[in-house]
Amino acid sequence: MARELYNARLERKDCISEVSQCYHFVFVIDELESFPFTAGQFVSAVAEDAKGKMQTRAYSVASAANGNRFELCVNRVEEGFFSNHLADLPDLPIGAIVQVHGPHGHFILHEPLTDSILVATGTGVAPMRGFLQWLFPVDGLDRSQGKDIWLVYGTRYETELYYHEEFEALAQRKANFHYLPTLSRAKEDWGGLRGYVQDHVARIVKERAAHLGLQVPQPAIDPSIPAADLRFDIYAYICGLNDMVSGVREQLAGFGWHKKQIVFERYD
Ligand SMILES: Cc1cc2nc3c(=O)[nH]c(=O)nc-3n(C[C@H](O)[C@H](O)[C@H](O)COP(=O)(O)OP(=O)(O)OC[C@H]3O[C@@H](n4cnc5c(N)ncnc54)[C@H](O)[C@@H]3O)c2cc1C
């Protein structure tokens, strides 16, 4: 069946990091009254390349559902077609059209909500921003149910931490949201965390287990229990490039985490 293509009109485009050439986009689908999706899902964007070939790329929505608007966070990939096509959309005059279909994907929060470790690098933070907007709406009801939500966000330099002030402000506003930005190539004046996301994920898992009196690694689950009956009190959601995603998955498996507790989205 042909997928329905929508015309998404560019309403706003901001360069949020000159160094890594990352852009934040706001699109409106005028032909729809609302564009419903679950936070964490992606849209597929479609455009013709210079050779007349139709190209499709997935982009996580960087916002929670909001009428007929959706937001994206995209960085230029060297020699890549689509990321540069988006980054080059004119913002003067504003209003370029990009065709999209969707929403798609299963990178969404588990229900009922549990404590959650969100782990991202680079633009992998896009669906996390969607989760956080859904959990902690600025002018709506808090949906986090007091669960602890950690965002472990890794990049090389401070200039590549997208939405940093926004996450800092959220952490100030909500005691159960813990923001852990970490830099692998921090300059000397960086006063925050250093190293890779794995270092901090390990610390969260161990400290939480110690606090709750749980064992690490957690004891193996009885394999006779049907997968549908398994209940966990914590999940991890990992998004970014494959190397990081695989690294964190292996690490959590080493802590005895069940594969159902580890939800991930790979960008490459
Ligand atoms: C489910 C899903 C969601 C995604 N969400 C986002 C998002 O929110 N923001 C975003 O910027 N990208 C996202 N991506 C990646 C995106 O779909 C494209 O792959 C990316 O924009 C590169 O496309 P391109 O046409 O510019 O490069 P291409 O011409 O397709 O590829 C050029 C080369 O770059 C590599 N590459 C692909 N993605 C990256 C990357 N992010 N960084 C470094 N190298 C890369 C490819 O493996 C390839 O070798 C997502 C991918 C998936 C599968």
Image (cartoon, rainbow, N blue to C red):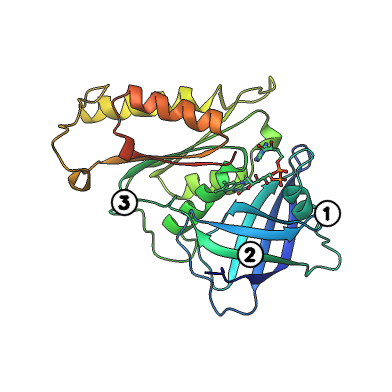
Task: Residue at 36% x, 53% y: name it.
Answer: 144
Task: Residue at 56% x, 80% y: name it.
Answer: 33
Quarter of the picture containing the C terminus is top right
Mark 2 to mark 1 CA distance (whole Å): 20 Å
Give the label, 1 or 3, closer to the camera: 1
Mark 2 to mark 3 CA distance (whole Å): 30 Å
Q: Residues within 10 Å of mark 2 (few under 14, many from 20)?
A: many
**For residue 214, what is the image quadrant?**
top left
In the structure shown, which secondary structural element does the residue marked by tag 2 occupy?
strand
Residue at far right of view: 92
On screen, residue 17 above or below 57: above
Mark 1 to mark 3 CA distance (whole Å): 46 Å
**Which residue in the structure is indicated by mark 3?**
113
Residue 265 shown left or right of residue 263 in the figure? right
**Which residue in the structure is indicated by mark 2?**
100
Dot 1 beta carbon under 8 Å from ligand 1: no
Which mark is first along the chain, 1 or 2?
Answer: 1
In the structure shown, which secondary structural element does the residue marked by tag 1 occupy?
loop
Task: Residue at 13% x, 36% y: name it.
Answer: 224
Residue 51, numbered circle = 1
Residue 179 shown left or right of residue 99 in the figure? left
Q: Residues within 10 Å of mark 1 (few under 14, many from 20)?
A: few
Which quadrant of the figure shows ligand 1?
A: top right
Three-letter code, disc 1? Lys
**For residue 208, what is the image quadrant?**
top left
Three-letter code, disc 3? Leu
